[in-house]
Image (cartoon, helix red, strand yellow):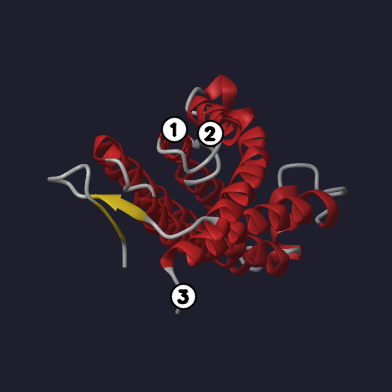
């Protein structure tokens, strides 16, 4: 199956690609013109349910699968310096939580969207209120507040820079974009999610290339810091 590190690189590139796909679809393909008014959002969903489903699947469940692989690959790759192992574990926990939130948000969006599409044919009022609830829940789980993803990104960037896996430019860039994600927890700064998403495209792509190009992991023995041996 190849090394976990290489698959981690592929996963990072896949996440970046899913973001590019999502931005391109929502900005260049889906047109909201003519969907104004109280029922406009519901009509837009009903008319574009298949494209929206494709976007949600790519941006949430598939990206979450890739994030699981990437989180573990980074956990192994960055576990070189004993002084960083505790923080590396913390970063892995945040990565796992973020993946879980992406799964949940995607599933809520997919099921909710198809449910309201069916309801709209018989009870439009119920469909409208249901979609409002679905949108709030999905937005809260993933996309509206990027605190968890921001913390993970900042931690990984700091650790990778500290152990010399990435350069300072990528390290500080990741910390800055992670901080922007963390800031979205403040309601007045929620519009920063778009900047966070665009920054992630660059960061995930660069991280993926770094994982694909780097050599085998070298670990330091926990009890004898001077004895190094290549990891299997």
Q: Secondary structure at mark 1?
A: helix
- Which of pointers 2 and 3 lies earlier in the amino acid sequence? 3
Q: Quadrant of the N terminus?
A: bottom left
Disc 3 marks which residue? 2
Instruction: Give coordinates of residue 147: x percent, y percent.
Output: 45, 34
Residue 36 seen by the camera: yes
Disc 1 marks which residue? 158
Q: Secondary structure at mark 3?
A: loop
Could you tell whether 33 is left or right of 227 in the image?
right
Could you tell whether 58 is left or right of 82 in the image?
right
What residue sits 53% from the left and 65% below the top?
Answer: 62
- Which of pointers 3 and 1 lies earlier in the amino acid sequence? 3
Label disc, if present, on residue 202 of the rendered structure: none
Q: Report which quarter residue 53 is drawn in.
A: bottom right
What residue sits 80% from the left and 56% below the top?
Answer: 30
C-alpha distance separating marks 3 and 1: 27 Å
């Amino acid at each position: 199956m190849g090394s976990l590190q290489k698959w981690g690189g592929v996963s990072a590139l896949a996440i970046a690609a899913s973001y590019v796909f999502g931005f391109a679809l929502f900005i260049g393909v889906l047109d909201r013109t003519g969907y104004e008014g109280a029922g406009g959002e519901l009509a837009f969903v009903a008319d574009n349910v298949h494209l929206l489903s494709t976007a949600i699947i790519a941006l949430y469940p598939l990206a979450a699968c890739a994030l699981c692989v990437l989180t573990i690959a980074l956990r192994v790759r960055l576990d070189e310096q004993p002084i960083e192992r505790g923080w590396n574990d913390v970063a892995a926990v945040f990565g796992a939580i973020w993946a879980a939130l992406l799964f949940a948000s995607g599933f809520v969006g997919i099921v909710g969207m198809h449910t309201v599409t069916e309801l709209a044919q018989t009870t439009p009022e119920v469909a409208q209120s249901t979609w409002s609830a679905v949108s709030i829940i999905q937005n809260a789980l993933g996309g509206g507040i990027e605190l968890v993803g921001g913390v993970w990104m900042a931690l990984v960037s700091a650790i990778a820079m500290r152990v010399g896996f990435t350069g300072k430019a990528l390290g500080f860039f990741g910390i800055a974009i992670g901080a922007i994600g963390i800031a979205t927890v403040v309601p007045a700064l929620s519009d920063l999610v778009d900047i966070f998403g665009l920054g992630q495209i660059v960061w995930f792509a660069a991280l993926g290339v770094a994982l694909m190009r780097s050599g085998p992991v070298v670990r330091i023995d926990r009890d004898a810091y001077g004895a190094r041996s290549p990891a299997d």
